[in-house]
Image (spheres, rainbow, N blue to C red):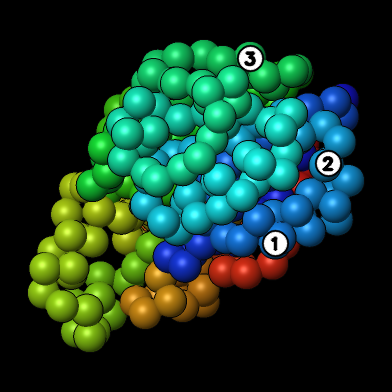
């Protein structure tokens, strides 16, 4: 049985990913309209097997349609940390709610889900790593730096969704107010293109294996897909890693299905 992934939307204006096997589907984050997510479920034929919505943190680009979706899909449980639950407005019923902890390993159908801490200015942000029959997917976005724990979770991933939020120079000279620039650049902000490239080199050094890397959560104001791709490619090549050998590299679309992959 295969482990599959696609992105429904990725970027600072809304995030939602889908991970599924033949019998179990989960949505990670609901930062776009419920309609768009349901369209994605229909297009991938996963509506019937959807059993979970996993939230990374309470920022609106990740939780916009949580209440709507929970109401429309009563069979679906919504998983989030206590900090995330406490800091978002929602109307999710008690029965549908599940509280997660960092370090927890969760079983949802035939998916094993590992929950790990991220470094972001939210109450209790987490990333997720999925395992199914020896294949792995890890999702690492909305983190200002990559910790040892993050590297450990991402190391084995056959498919890694990795944040490449901004180009540092574009952000510095751009029109964001000073406090926002400081926030994005901080250890609890977002990974830059350069940080994503360095993170990948570190992962390849630790564990040389073939992997697909989807650059994610690109900023509309402070990045371009080509720039994210090229910056990461250059950093990999400087370290003697080449796209097409160890790494397949793509950038996810802000809007619409992309990164469709079957492992
Ligand atoms: Zn965030
Ligand atoms: Zn975000």
Is the residue under label 3 in contact with that under label 1 (CB below 8 Å)? no
Q: Secondary structure at mark 1?
A: helix
Taking the image as drawn, is residue 24 in sight? yes
Name the disc covering residue 95, or none.
Answer: none
All told, the count of numbered labels is 3
Q: Residue at x 31, y 40 (%)?
A: 87
The residue tagged with tag 3: helix, strand or loop?
Answer: strand
Marks 2, 1: nearer the viewer: 1
Chain-order first, disc 1 or disc 3? 1
Image point (37%, 52%), residue name: 59
Residue at (72% x, 44% y) in the render: 72
Residue denoted by label 1: 36
Residue 129 image position (x, y, % from top left): 54, 29
Q: Is residue 16 above or below residue 109?
A: below
Q: Is residue 221 above or below residue 47?
A: below
Name the quarter where the C terminus is drawn: top right
Q: Decide which of 113, 152 is in the foreground and name it.
A: 113
Q: Residues within 10 Å of mark 3 (few under 14, many from 20)?
A: few
Q: For the residue with label 3, is its CB less than 8 Å from the closest atom of ligand 2?
A: no
**Residue 122: x percent and y percent?**
27, 44
Relative to the observer, which residue lies in front, 171 or 205? 171
Which residue carries the number 3 mark? 107
Q: Position of residue 137 (x, y in %)?
A: 61, 34
């Amino acid at each position: 049985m295969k482990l599959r992934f696609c992105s429904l939307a990725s970027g600072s204006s809304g995030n939602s990913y889908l991970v599924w096997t033949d019998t179990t589907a989960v949505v990670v984050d609901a930062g776009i309209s419920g309609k768009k997510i349901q369209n994605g479920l229909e297009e991938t034929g996963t509506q019937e097997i959807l059993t979970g919505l996993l939230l990374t943190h309470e920022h609106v680009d990740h939780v916009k349609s949580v209440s709507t979706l929970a109401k429309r899909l009563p069979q679906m449980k919504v998983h989030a940390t206590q900090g995330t639950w406490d800091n978002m407005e929602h109307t999710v019923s008690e029965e549908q709610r599940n509280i997660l902890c960092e370090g927890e390993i969760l079983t949802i159908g035939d998916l094993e889900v590992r929950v790990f801490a991220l470094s972001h200015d939210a109450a209790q942000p987490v990333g997720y790593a999925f395992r199914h029959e020896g294949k792995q997917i890890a999702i690492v976005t909305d983190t200002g730096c990559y910790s040892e724990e993050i590297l450990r979770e991402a190391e084995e991933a056959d498919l890694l969704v990795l944040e490449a939020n901004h180009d540092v120079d574009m952000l510095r000279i751009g029109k964001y107010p000073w406090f926002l620039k400081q926030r994005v650049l901080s250890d609890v902000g977002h990974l830059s293109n350069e940080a994503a490239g360095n993170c990948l080199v570190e992962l390849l050094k630790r564990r040389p294996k073939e992997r697909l890397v989807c650059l994610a959560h690109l900023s509309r104001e402070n990045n371009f897909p080509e720039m994210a791709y090229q910056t990461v490619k250059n950093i990999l090549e400087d370290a003697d890693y080449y796209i097409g050998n160890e790494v397949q590299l793509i950038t996810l679309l802000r809007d619409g299905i992309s990164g469709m992959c079957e492992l």
